[in-house]
Image: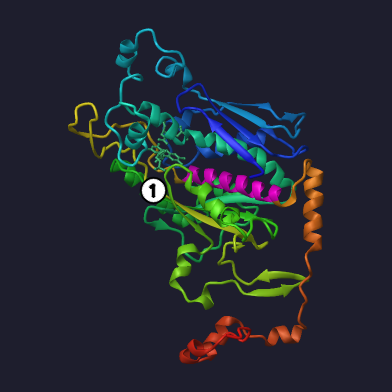
Amino acid sequence: MTLRYLTAGESHGPALVGILEGLPAGVPVDLDAIAHQLERRRAGHGRSPRMKFEADEFQVLAGVRHGLTIGSPVALVIHNTEWPKWTEAMAVEAPEDPEAVAQTGRGRPLTRPRPGHADLVGMQKYGYDEVRNVLERASARETATRVGLAAVARGLLDQLGISVLSHVVRIGEVAVPEDAPPPGPGEQERVDDDPVRCAEGATSERMQERIDRAKGERDTLGGVVEVVAYGVPVGLGSHVHWDRKLDGRLAQALMSIQAFKGVEVGEGFRTAEVPGSKAHDEIVASEGDYRRLTSRSGGLEGGITTGEPLRVRAAMKPLSSLTQPLRTVDVETGEEAQAITQRSDVCAVPRAGVVAEAIVALELADALLEKTGGDSLDEVRRNLEAFLGSLPRAAEPSANARAAEPSADDRAAERPADDRAAERPADDPA
Ligand SMILES: Cc1cc2nc3c(=O)[nH]c(=O)nc-3n(C[C@H](O)[C@H](O)[C@H](O)COP(=O)(O)O)c2cc1C
Ligand SMILES: C=C(O[C@@H]1CC(C(=O)O)=C[C@@H](OP(=O)(O)O)[C@H]1O)C(=O)O
């Protein structure tokens, strides 16, 4: 890992803290860009009441001077707006009168763990008799730090012409059509203007109605987000070892987002439903380069980027804090009970898309620096250009030969199925 990061901070503590280590010197850091990313993460139809007043006031404490990184770790702090209300319940020092704190609203022991949240397993693992210490850190409040750090890492990607965007493709059972193309590189603002961050106006309206219905039914909803990265060079990641494969690294990072339960690279699960002739991206030579005719692989083959747009999808489950709570056990009495009710999002998929986008940006920046090395932005740029310039040019067939060459679909259609099954690859001597 070339670019590393750590986060700390409780949801209702004084602040969140993050450190990003491994960025080269000379990367522009724009405070407005960090503020903008944090703001995007707070938006979206169905968001929690807290997101309407949370300010995400932040400070860059280290690693940046006069608008540029200086090669040292970048440190970020994001203050929690509500801290003044939590000073007693979340105090660092032991209270003089713990009983008195336990009587206050915020210090009250939470003994009815929510099914689907980290509550019960966290208590069991860490030896607590109530939920507070688990809830505080399991909360997706932590993702503000990752989005903030990613905004800094995106400064590097921007300089190299790499842009990362996201959009919502499903909320509950409402989905954009399977064959709808993803938004293009300049379309993030248009997507962000949509209340559910969906690129398709008609589907967006149905998604919003679905969220309103869930709210009325005192229920919650999940969905699917897609992240697309444009301008990604060929050759990031590697096929040689399991933990160097970029598809695997992206999946791990995306699955680490609270409530994310599935990851798909390119057509992912859908490729399992179609034959090989319809699952892969045929390769052609074009202006000395290799291009793919389709984008089913999501821009990754063998754990290595192909140079085509990178495309991943991730599924988020419905949130587990229901205002009509699920059945649980009160760990204090052992009696059947209703789970604790917390102020909560009804559907956090639109803002979770911004988190997924940040996570992909951090992984791409890491993979890029791993490929190029370099202590300064100039050196990274030089190394990248040298690598790309050293790639052998694709020999191009004559225009006539290219026009005459049938595609896999054409070839498959021409042959009877039995012939296709019996055929042995021409290059295979076996
Ligand atoms: C952006 C975002 C917002 C979330 N908001 C809530 C919420 O308001 N209520 C809730 O119960 N869970 C919420 N979650 C999910 C929980 O944090 C998550 O379910 C919990 O930490 C347990 O982790 P797991 O679901 O990955 O097992 C949110 C997740 C994300 C990514
Ligand atoms: C605070 C954030 O999201 C929170 C994530 C969250 C959870 O259980 O994950 C529960 C809610 O926390 P609270 O009860 O404090 O409002 C959300 O608001 C945030 O995203 O910044």
**Residue placed under numbered mark 1 in the picture:** 317
From the viewer's perspective, is 218 left or right of 35? left
Residue drawn 27% across and 31% down?
A: 112
Few, some or many residues within 10 Å of mark 1 (<14, 14–19, 20+): many
Residue drawn 45% across and 13% down?
A: 93
Q: Quadrant location of residue 408? A: bottom right
The x and y percentages for residue 324 are 26, 38
Q: At numbered mark 1, what does the secondary structure look like: helix, strand or loop?
A: loop
The relative height of residue 13 versus residue 371 in the rendered view (above or below) is above
The x and y percentages for residue 216 are 30, 42
Q: Indicate if the residue with disc 1 has its beta carbon within 8 Å of ligand 1.
A: yes
Looking at the image, the residue that sits furthest to the front is 430
Residue drawn 29% across and 34% down?
A: 113
The relative height of residue 142 versus residue 174 in the rendered view (above or below) is above
The x and y percentages for residue 355 are 53, 43
From the viewer's perspective, is 377 left or right of 304? right
Q: Which quadrant is the N terminus positioned in?
A: top right
> Quick check: which quadrant has ligand 1?
top left
Asked if residue 400 lies in the magenta stretch, the reply is no
Looking at the image, the residue that sits furthest to the top is 96
Read off the magenta span: 350-370
The x and y percentages for residue 391 are 78, 64
The relative height of residue 111 versus residue 196 in the rendered view (above or below) is above
From the viewer's perspective, is 319 left or right of 59? left
Of 279 and 1, the residue lying toward us: 1
From the viewer's perspective, is 330 left or right of 135? left
The relative height of residue 63 versus residue 326 in the rendered view (above or below) is above
Q: Which quadrant is the C terminus positioned in?
A: bottom right
Magenta span dominant secondary structure: helix
Residue drawn 81% across and 44% down?
A: 378
Of 85 and 60, the residue lying toward us: 60
Q: Say which amino acid is labelled 1.
A: Lys
